[in-house]
Image (tube, rainbow, N blue to C red):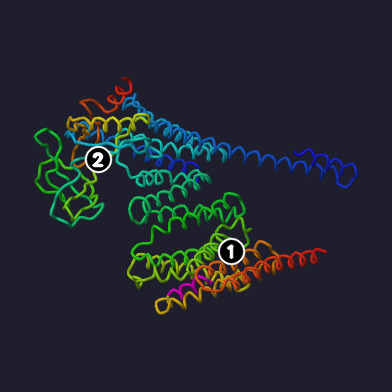
Amino acid sequence: MKTIHIFLIFTVVAAIQLVVPSLMIFNKETVLKKGAAYRFKTQPIDPSDPFRGKYITLNYEVSTYNTKDSLWQQNEDIYVYVGTDSLDFAQVDTISKVLIPNKHQDYIKAKVGWYSKYNNNLQIDFPFDRYYMEETKAYAAEVAVRDRQRDTIPNDTYALVFVKNGEAVLNDVIIDDMSIKDYVEQGSMK
Amino acid sequence: MNSKIQKDVSELLEAQVISKETALKIEGYYLSKNANTTNRLFTIFAVLGSMLVGLGMILILAHNWDSFSRTVKTVFAFAPLVVGQIIAGYSILKKKSKTWKEASGVFLFFAVGASMALVSQIYNLPGDLSHYLLTWIVLCLPLVYLLRSNTLVILQIVFITSYACHFGYFSGSKTPWLYLVLFACLMPFYFRLLKQKRTQHITTVLNWLVPLSVIIVIGTFVKGDGNISFLIYVLLFGLLYNVAKTPYFNNLKLRQNGFLVLGSLGTVYMLLLTTFDWLWNSVFIENPNFNSQSFFIASILFCLALTILVYTQVKKETQKFNLFQYAFVFFTIFFAISFFSAHTTIILINLLILILGIIVVKIGVDTLHFGVLNYGLLIITALITCRFFDTNISFVIRGLLFVAVGAGFFLTNYIMLKKRKTIKS
């Protein structure tokens, strides 16, 4: 093969290498700019990823959904229709295996975690269970939230998630009305 | 050039053993040889350098710098990628040396990973390491062929193995079918090396890496019937051993032929494992499910191994009958017999190992190879040791058996040493 042909194919490969992360960014930016914001009550714990660094895993209060329908398969795609409760926190309204026609409500494309026949609870795996943090802050964040929950004040730690056409982007984790990053920073300065 | 060679050449020239012309030719030969060694060393250091820089870049980005805005982070995500692409593109266009291509390829490989990792961090993309690895691998796969990079093919094999393990073993019981596609995509590169650079170091590395990758990943394909997994592993090792006997590998040195070593050791290990009574009584309690994915995989492996076995026999690659090549066929028959009588199967497998051991000892003696001789003796010793656990032979007989085997080790080695000395003298 001639060098120029190899170079042309390389240019295509290089373009694809640039397009893939760009598309990821574009999709997420669209959701952040045009999507609706929801507040998901949460509890963080801190694991790490070999390539992407430290993050906190978010366990959501609404990830357990009570339903009599027991025909759920692990990792099956589901559509979670969300609304808000009286305190303006996100709540799950309906879960469906297919998109419900003419239902004009925000939904999130998620996966089935597992179904417990014992208490009829369906565990939902939301596609926004990771919040990346600076490596020194992740564990401190977990400790801060745990300490905060020991107080008598009810849990008001929540994830700010933007939702649009089934896509969801986790924008921030809020504790005491401030970003968890600032909360941890403030705590370490005290 | 080595000063000793220079000294020898001038000595030979003075003694008029060689002409001035020959002396110049010898000097020229060693000079060109030295230049090649320097180039290879330089390539190795360049690759190591790029790899360390690339990995360092990923680690620095993994710190997750909070103080940078989203835009700054996005620029950081693309900067190494673009730099890597420019250097790699320049290497191709200007037909730069192997060192350039290897180093730029490795740097670009890690830049792609770093870029995707940073985008994941910025937008808090969900977990699933296997999905992240898969995208990374696919985006860099064409680089192997475009840059003809040996290091990239090694990295790709390591990464596809890692992807398959994450997908199949660690994140649920899914089958990584895409591993097969990615593996097949890398094979033309490997075949080209086998044809053109059979004895080079890179081919030797791949001769070990390729079978190791398959051995590690095969467990993820065992679905539906765990009982057949033993058969699958025996068939896989049989396949590897038979591949080692094809024209591409047959005359390679032992250390260059990973297929042969892993196939042989794996076959012996699996056969020894299946000689235990408890295994057939506790594991194989149910009849196998012939409609399972495991059975399908076992059938494919059997057909592949049998095809290669027939091919080697037709090509007459191996002059003598080699029982190791047929071990998987015998085991499959014994496995089928186990549905009627597990006891008969155990006896037959014991016999098979014993015969294999004796054959290896004979090959060792015939070829005067101490390594092969002792490998054969080790197989027999391992078989006897295993039988100590599930037979009720008296301690005296067991002791005598061990003494006999020990004496056998000593005697055979001693006799062969003498034979070798006689032949030499």
Under mark 1, the amino acid is: Pro
Helix, strand or loop: magenta stretch: helix
Q: Is residue B401 magenta?
A: no
SS at mark 1 in the image = loop
**Residue density around tag 2, few if under 14, some if 14–19, many if 20 or more, within 10 Å:** some
Please tell me whether residue B12 is drawn above or below residue B367 in the rendered image. above
Image quadrant assignment for residue A134:
top left
Q: Position of residue B361 (x, y in %)?
A: 65, 69
Residue ID for mark 1: B247
What is the span of residues highlighted in magenta in the rendered image?
B326-335
SS at mark 2 in the image = strand
Please tell me whether residue B155 is drawn above or below residue B294 in the rendered image. above
Residue farthest along the right direction in this orientation: B15
Q: Position of residue B80 (x, y in %)?
A: 43, 32
Q: Residue at the location (67% across, 66% down)?
A: B409
Under mark 2, the amino acid is: Asn
Residue ID for mark 2: A59
Q: Nearer the viewer, residue B215 or B109?
A: B215
Give the quadrant of the N terminus of chain B: top right
Q: Position of residue B321 (x, y in %)?
A: 60, 74
**Residue B161 in the figure: left or right of residue A82:** right
Chain of the residue on which disc 1 is drawn: B
